[in-house]
Image (cartoon, grey):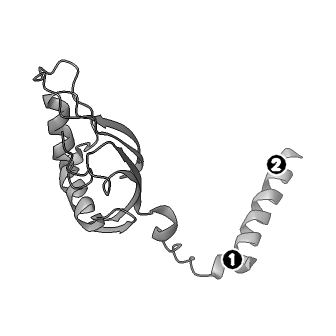
Amino acid sequence: MLRRLVLTSAASVVALGVASPLAAAAPLPPLPLLPPLLSSPDSLTITVERSGNPAADGTFRLECDGDQGGGTHPRADRACARLEALSANGRDPFAPVPQDRMCTQQHGGPATARITGTWHGRKVDARFARTNGCEIARWENLQPVLPMARS
């Protein structure tokens, strides 16, 4: 009885495979990639306070698609190009100063900035101030993303 069941099942599978309309059909083409849905321009919000330049203070949106910039940032193209250059070889342009770094104890003024958003698929939430030599250098390295600040 079991032998008959196995033979009948095997014959049915073979018959279905030959008679099936799907068996004679050509393979389906691959699905097209959808880059506009999977990738979007990098988008950052930059808030600057007490820079010494009233035109530079405020909140600006920066959208980068490679070196091409958009949004409300006054120097969007140059800012995007600078961020791309600082991101070469997987570097993080928003990285904080290492805690073990020796920094000169000089004050660069009351300016502060915060950058939030997404850069190269990573979340960004970075704060900037000009509280010592290392932080001043970090700020200036990010110009023109951050404005030139006056002490």
As helix, strand or loop, the secondary structure at mark 2 comes to helix
Q: Residue at x 32, y 42 (%)?
A: 50
The count of marks equals 2
Q: Nearer the viewer, mark 2 or mark 1?
A: 1
Figure check: 35 above or below 92: below
Label 2: how many Cα within 10 Å (few below 14, some 14–19, many 20+): few
Mark 1 residue element: helix
**Residue type of the residue flagged with mark 2:** Arg
Closer to the camera, 120 or 109?
A: 109
Q: Quadrant of residue 22?
A: bottom right
- Vertical placement of 90 versus 63: above or below? above
Which residue lies under the disc numbered 2?
3
- For the residues bearing labels 2 and 1, Cβ distance under 8 angstroms: no
Would residue 53 be found to the left or right of residue 15 on screen? left
Question: Which quadrant does the C terminus fall into?
Answer: top left
Q: Which residue is located at x 34 percent, y 36 percent?
A: 127
- State the residue in front, 54 or 146: 54
Quarter holding residue 40: bottom left
Q: Is residue 69 left or right of residue 11?
A: left
Q: Which mark is residue 13?
A: none
What residue is shown with label 1?
22
Q: Is residue 11 above or below residue 121?
A: below
Front-most of residues 137 and 150: 150
Could you tell me how far apart the alpha carbons at marks 2 and 1 are, in whole angstroms? 29 Å
Place of residue 54 in the rendered image (x, y in percent of width and height, measured from the top left)? 32, 53
Name the residue type under label 1.
Leu
Report the front residue among 109 and 118.
109
